Every structure is written in structure tokens, then in C-alpha cells.
Image: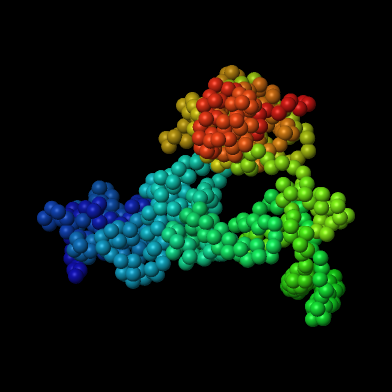
Amino acid sequence: MTTHLEISIDKLTLSTRFQARKTAGKMPLVELAESIDAQGLLQNLVVTKAKKRGTYEVIAGGRRLQAMQILIKAERMEPDAKVWAKLVDNAHAYEASLTENVQREAMHPADEFEAFARLIDEGSSVEAIAARFGVTPAAVRRRLRLASVAPDLIEFYRKGDMTLDALMAFTVTEDQDAQRAVWASLENYYTKDAGEIRRRLTQEAVTAGHAMARYVGLEAYHEAGGRSFTDLFATDDERGIYLQDVTLLEQLTNNKLALVATEIEKEGWAWVQVQPTFDSAWYSFGRVRPEMGTLSNEQQTQIEEIDSRLQSIEEEMDAIDDEDEDHEKWTRLEQEQIELQDRREAIEIENEVWSASAKAIAGVGIFLDSEGQVQYRRGLIRPEDRRRAAQEAGQNGEGEAHIGSLPVAKTRPAHSERLVRQLTAHKVGIIAADLASKPDIALAVLVAQLVRQVLGDGYFSLGGYGLGIRLNHEDLNGHAPDYLSGKAAQAMQDMRSHWLDQLPLDEEGQLSEDVLTWTLAQDSTTLLELLAFLVAGTVQGVTHYETSKPTDLDRLGNVTGVDLTQWWTPTAESYFSHVNKDQIAAVVTETHGAEEARSIAKMKKAQAAEHAQRLLADKAWLPVPLRIQSKPSQ
């Protein structure tokens, strides 16, 4: 129950116990004071009894109290002047503060969702809060999810250093340490947008829209013990659900596809291979062609009708004038064309006949398309069957198997795409750290790069102090999760700290506007050393595929003369656990001879990796992606 009473201003204090608003309103206090002086207090305060007898705490209207205190200090209002206030008991004080602030000048969103979280802690339900404040339960849940973000990140948002979209992106995980780590990792990133934050936090998860998730189904995934997390701010229901146990999802997918494979095996193929998603390695496989059976009268009629309609569609599309802008009609015809072509292909596939000789040397690849539908690639010839397939073709001309193409005569790369990226990210960081200690070379490289930009072809424009220079930085940690623990990263961090200690900073620890004044006062040696560090941070060169062709990064490494073996060491964690046993044996053969490598074959993978680490502990060896290729012409 609430009552109204008149209270002397000197009996009022601003509540800290029951104050929902933490972020100041936008109207300046002086302005508010002038308004109260001219018009009086138009809106009652809301108070609750304080611990000291006869005094009260203001739980809503604190800025009005502060404005009146300004008037009292200026002797424009008496300290014992009385104002009207609504009195509420302590039990409902916080809720009253929240209600008044929501209904008056808009609270900062951070205050609002933290306040909702406090009401939940005090025993309120989501539904009760929704009813009390006139919002939907879903809106309350979203605010509660925002309140679960790490407090220091909420404070960044409150101060305006983070957008609301970015804060919402952090809610895709409840791990506050992971949230803080991602925010810290974006310190030097070109943008701290929501998409990048969400991508980094969900790297180990897939959405419900993923092909495997659609194929297995959420119900089956959850029944198997799979965990998921819902992004309450996602606009797409499927993409708003994140499945966290990807290994389990892959297992469920493979188990279900195995049943499909069992049926395909009954067709008599030499092999059947299941992949949850399309394997690009199949592009290097050879193919056998099916024989075409005789079309039934019905099939022949369908083919003729489809061909006739396709001809008509083509003529109609050609007749559409671009200037008519009849895009809707053109799009409709194009969609019909695609559907008819798919129907025609389906009839032909239905009529395919695979000979016994074809099935004897070929197999079937089974995978899921992007919609989670099972797809088949029949008639594939594996690389290891190349010789037998070639003999088949040689013995029978084109061969009874109707060989269309043989597998590409190429061995599988020793290093995966992921490992190549990881190693070349280290290569970039090492060359950058080395370059940072050689200012004379850094200056020469910078001048050479500028000559190419200014005198060569291209358009470059960026603000600053009137110079059209743009410095780009690669996200090395994103490519190599172990990069930050390496020598190169530590060297760069030490140099960064050194220069931040030298440069002028403002009160918040950020670079001040006096940077140009500072640089103008330095000698050339200091500027060259700083320039070397700045240029070193722009070193580029992470690659996705292994190559022996020299790159621009190799050109730079040759110029600096860096010894990468002083910066990177092959260990089980950094290299050997990422390659197969054959590659481990090849490395040991290269460094210790074939006799030492023979023991690798008898070991388990983990044991072999640890053994190789010990053997190469004192060896200056680098994997191919880390090596500086032969010096190209300058």
C-alpha cells in the first residue's frame, strides 16, 4: 500500500539501496534546477523509509532532488522546504524505482535489463515481470540474457564503447571468460561488429540450419544428449539455435548415413564412402560412365514435352527487353527452366544402367547437400585404383566399364589446409617480429611499397595526417590458435608495450591528439625504430594451400635474412599431432635417417608425435609451409 505525504527536502537522501537507474539522464541538472525554480516540482518524488528515524530515501526522482539541492546551495530554495512524495515500503522499493524510471525519462537499456535480473533474483517470475511492465515474456528473457553478459562488457556498452548489436552478439554463449577473451582479441581488429563477435564465439558449434542438423533433426540430437543454445536475438529460428556437441552430431549423421550406404552396397559397387558434407577430394577421382537404357514410351513423351517447353522458355526469355525491367517474369521463367532441367536429368538418371565391370572398379560417394538431403555420386574411381582402371580401359578400348576419366595422378598433400594456414600464420608473425628489430630494412621496404602504390597502377586513399597510406593487419590468432604463446607474438607484445609507454596518452590510456607533436620532437633513430614496429604489424601472407612457388612473404623473408628455426620449434602440439604417421616418419627420415623412422610404424599416433618431438628437440627443422622458398628475382 502506498501513501502520499509532504517531506522537508533536508530529510531526503538519494537511495543507493533501491536505485534502478545507474546511468544519468540526458537533461543537464542545471537546466532541471531552472525548470523547478520557475515552475515548481511538477512530478512527485517516490521515497521509502531510511534507516535513520524520520528520514527518507528517494528511489525515483533522484535527479529532481539533486536539482533542488543546487537551488538550496544557491540560496534560491529553503532547506526545510516541503515537497510531495509517494511513500512505498522497503519490500517494494526497488520495483517502484524501476517502474517510475521506465515510465518517465527512458532508462539506459543496461540499467533496465540489470534491474530485471535483480527482480528475478528477488523471486519474481518472467511472466510476472512482463505483466507488471507491459512487455512480452520474450522481451523479458532477452533482457535477462543481456544481463548475463560479463559485467565489464556491459560497462563498455553503458559508456558507449560498445554497440547494442555487439552486446547482443555476446549472448550466444554464457561463458563470460570466453566473452572477455573475444572482446580482447578484437582490440586491433578493424571492426568490432556483431557478426565477427558471434562468429568467434560459435566457432566450435553449428546452427540448426546446418546440413547435418537438418538431416539428424533436433529431437534426435537432444535425445542423444546433445546440448544446444538459443540466440534470443536471431531473426532466423534455424540459425538462432546453436548445437554445441558437433562430434556427437557428426556421429549421429554418419550412423544414419551408414544405413543408406547399406542399401547402396546391395547394388554391387566396389566401395561406398560416406561423408557428412561434400568432399572436394572427389573432384580428383576418375569416373565411369553408365550405359543408357531404352526409354519407356512414357519417359520419351515426358522428355519431348520438357524439351519443347524449355525451347519456349528460352524464346520468351530472349524476347524480354532489359529496358522493360520485367524482372519478375524473367525470374519466374528462369525458375521454371531450372525445375524442368532437373526433371529431365532425373528421368535420365532413372534410366542409367551400370555394368558389372563398371561396378567392379568404381564406387559411390554419399553426402548431404546444404538442405540436409542425401545425394549420391555413382561411378567414382579412387586414385589408388587408377592403375587397374587404366588396364581395364587398355584391354577393352573404351572398356566395358565405359571409363570417362581416370583419377588425377597426384598424391594427397602432406599438410591439411588448416595446418598450412596455422604454419604460415606463424611464418608471418616471425618475419614481422624479425623485421621490427631491423628499422633500416623496414624503412626500405616501406619506401619500396609506397613506390609501387604511388607510381604503379591502383587507387589508394585513406585519411590521417594527409597521407594516403593504409596499414592492414592479419588476424594471426584467428588462423593459428597457438600463435599468442609463441616467441614472435611475445616479442611484438613487448614492443607494443614499450611504445605505448613512450607515446602521449590521454586520461583514459588512449593515444592523445598530441601524437604528431610528439613525433615532430623525436630524432630519426627513434622514428625509424617506431616505423619498423608499425610496418612489421602489416606483414601479410597467410595461405590456405601448400605451394612451393615463392610468395611476396618469401621475398620479404629473403631480404631480412630471418632464421625461422630460432623462432619456431616442431612439437607434438605445434605440428606432429596435426599430420599422419607417414608424414611423421618422413620428417624423422629427413632428420635422423630411415632406420630411426622404422620405429614410428609400430607406435600409436600420440606416441609417435611425442617421440618425434624428442628427436627433433635440438634440430633446426621446418615444415614446408614455414620454409622460406628460394629467393625470387627482385
Task: Specify the quadrant that holds the C terminus.
Answer: top right
Q: Residue furthest left?
A: 53
Q: Is residue 405 above or below residue 323?
A: above
In the image, residue 7 lies at what x, y percent?
18, 60
Is residue 475 in view?
no
Query: In the picture, residue 540 is in which quadrant?
Result: top right
Compared across the picture, whether 397 is left or right of 357 comes to right
In the image, residue 619 lies at what x, y percent?
58, 22
Nearer-the-camera pick, 352 or 539:
352
Nearer-the-camera pick, 471 or 71:
471
Task: Specify the quadrant that holds the N terminus.
Answer: bottom left
Q: Is residue 237 above or below residue 599?
A: below
Compared across the picture, whether 555 is left or right of 597 comes to right
Say which residue appears at 20% left-offset and 62% top-offset: 91
Structure colour scheme = rainbow
Say which residue appears at 78% left-offset and 46% top-offset: 387
Compared across the picture, whether 58 is left or right of 572 comes to left
Nearer-the-camera pick, 401 or 92:
401
Nearer-the-camera pick, 394 or 450:
394
In the image, residue 579 lies at what x, y percent?
59, 38
